[in-house]
Amino acid sequence: MAPPILIGGLHVDRRLHDFIEKEVLTPPDGVESLGIDSQRFWNGFENAIRRLQPVCESLLQKREFLQRRIDHYHRTKRNEAFDPLDYKEFLYKIGYLVDQGEDFQVQVQDVDPEIATMAGPQLVVPLSNPRFSLNAVNARWGSLFDSLYGSDVIPQTGELQESSSYNPKRGQAVIKRACDFLDATFPMRKGSYCSIKGVKLQHQSNGCILEFILPSSEITELEDPTLFAGYSGDIQPNQESRAGGFSILLRHNNLHVELIFDPLNAKAQSEHPAALKDVLLESALSTIQDCEDSVTAVDAEDKILLYRNWLGLCLGTLTCEMPNKKIRSMNPDREFSSPTGNSLVLPGRSLMLIRNVGHHMFTDAVTHAVTDQQIPEGFLDAFVTSLIGLYDIKGLGQKKNSRKGTIYIVKPKQHGPEEVALTNELLGMVEQTLGLPRYTIKLGLMDEERRTSLNLKACIREAHRRTIFINTGFLDRTGDEIHTSFELGAFDLKDNLKSGAWIEAYEKQNVQIGLQCGMFGRGQIGKGMWAEPDGMKAMVDSKIKHPKGGASTAWVPSPKAATLHALHYHQVRVHEIQKELLKVCGEKSGQNESPFLDALLQIQVVADRSAFTARAIQKELDNNVQGLLGYVVRWIDQGVGCSKVPNIDGVGLMEDRATLRISSQHVANWLRHGIVSEGQVFDTMRQMAAVVDHQNSKDPQYLPMEPHPFTSLAYQAALDLVFRGARQPNGYTEYILHQKRREAKKRCNGDEGEEEGSSMPGESSRWCKM
């Protein structure tokens, strides 16, 4: 490998340096320059590292200090009845809990409507996969027909079953379901969308109105004519359609729905009297392009891949070749005529945010020249992704992302207000370096770590000029819950953890604190992922609880899921619910302590082993280990950071590092408290390795674990995650995963040498000894 480039006091990986210099700071042909001097960029970057890296390391040391104090507290009181009041007082004493402080309102400017005033689904995709990234960006508009036909929302039994060819009976069920939605959302004065035989536009003095032709040739209109938003194609006011394709645009709850008619299409003619060909829903309003939990970026080579894809997205030039050899690119904006005849242009793509890594990760892509010390990886992410984002906010790309000239960075895994303050200062230094007005970069604050959720109001305060997004993350939050209270006792079964009192308090507080801090009309309040991508009926039946609870967005696992979840935002007026909740927030304002705090501090441990049967213990262990192995083997051997992994029953679940964190910490916790033995875990590992091998037997790139457990890096990583789990900082899995993935990449390159220069702080830095 070529030696690094010396820039000031930093060593920069030559490949990374060349990418920034030759691909980012030097624009492609026909694109105007960013106007950022290379020396200015690197000087600003180095200044931020020198000034803020000591702060970052000090805060990571504080994490360790707090965890040691909590461990000691639980060990000394393990044989006593748990005293919630004493525990809370202890957490205040050590600085784990802080007072909420005085009321305040977030003061954010130039926020796009997809975040500030619209409510709808959000996608999260690995930025390492161009196809996934493009699919997500293009999921702003989704086919309701396709989403219903290809999911279990329409029963997949009997005459409605899917087959290799089109099933007309299933198609009719899809049209019926879609028309039921239209009848409920855009009711006509008379009749149903299922039976209309045509549509026409009638010109009036203040613009045209939409009319529907019923089977009897009678004309009817929308009950609420203002829901008609526009039209396109071969239809004009007061004129007979020339039988070409056309569309009608409707608008409800700030979301658009497009009805596509195609009278020349034989299939559409046969299935609907007006040849209704499809119903498109405005679906994924926003997408988080992820550099963190869903990717396997362990070195400079991997980071460049992420940054290059982000550059393509910001320039509007990213493409990928599909299996059918077609080239996929970013969708254009959508053009209509308004009812008054004016031009109406709607975004054709999801608004993009980018998720950087947390403060706890370090990278050897850039090191201090004298000490060879690695720098915080999140610092690199902040500078490079913001630099690339300039192409969008300066309007230099082919496709526009933020119409408000804003860069949106989502920051995960922050622990408490001081770490949010560090992020705020870091982004300020990025803005200064890039010549941007203060607070151009907005912050998505992941409410996924225990110390952040317990101190959420104080966290938002530290970045109240930037925060436009808070989002609960049940998975990481549960993993941190287990690790924080590791020494208190054995945690309950995972299914029971999902119904704990603290979970309900966590979800409610997220909404109420966000509203209390002024995020109504200024930002997103979000909820976590639906993990079963094939279980769409269950999602449609249950995920409506998120908008009903006042959340303006929630994560979904696919574009199809986004379209189906979008139905909920037509059923529920989220902002009306938020207005009602604001009244409750007003009654609870001015308190030094969140009204949810006591419930949040409940810990779901069991008294002793007798709380579980032997069968229940083994079933839980099997489930944890099988899921752990199924995810890790793809992460280590194939570099896949997020995928649909079959569980022990063969049901595909979306897995990323958050789910792995729970599984590994749960088993490690049970080991610590004698619920399972080391021998039992070893035996289960071998048995489940065989199960996972069988589940992946049709994958030609798969490397079986069970035949060679002592040479399988994936299998060894799984063992480490469990048997070293108690020592992983905050229960994170990244350090072990990164180390083993780097070893796997060396094997692929024919280098069997021991891993050196690891980017794992847990292995190489002075603040984190495992």
Image (spheres, helix red, strand yellow):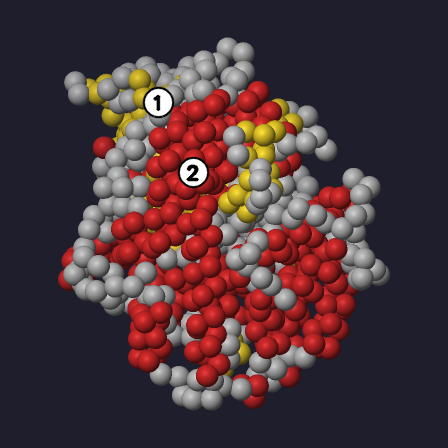
What residue is at 60 percent from the left and 43 percent from the top?
372
What residue is at 45 percent from the left and 40 percent from the top?
50
What residue is at 24 percent from the left and 19 percent from the top?
340
Please name the residue that numbered disc 1 is placed on.
Answer: 345
223 with respect to 312 (left or right): left
Q: Secondary structure at mark 1?
A: strand
Callout count: 2
Tell which of 738 and 429 is nearer to you. 429
Q: Is residue 170 visible?
A: no
Q: Is residue 585 above or below residue 409?
A: below
511 with respect to 631 (left or right): left
Q: Are marks 1 and 2 in contact (CB under 8 Å)?
A: no
Q: Secondary structure at mark 2?
A: helix
Q: Is residue 557 above or below residue 476?
A: above
Instruction: Quadrant for the C terminus, please.
Output: bottom right
Instruction: Quadrant for the N terminus, please.
Output: top right
Residue 620 x %, y %: 61, 73
Residue 19 x %, y %: 58, 26
Give the residue at the far top of this rendering: 30
Residue 404 x %, y %: 31, 28
| Distance from the alpha carbon under mark 1 to that under mark 2 | 41 Å
**Three-letter residue code for mark 2:** Ala
Q: Which of the two discs, 1 and 2, labels the residue nearer the N terminus?
A: 2
Please name the residue that numbered disc 2 is placed on.
Answer: 48
308 with respect to 650 (left or right): left
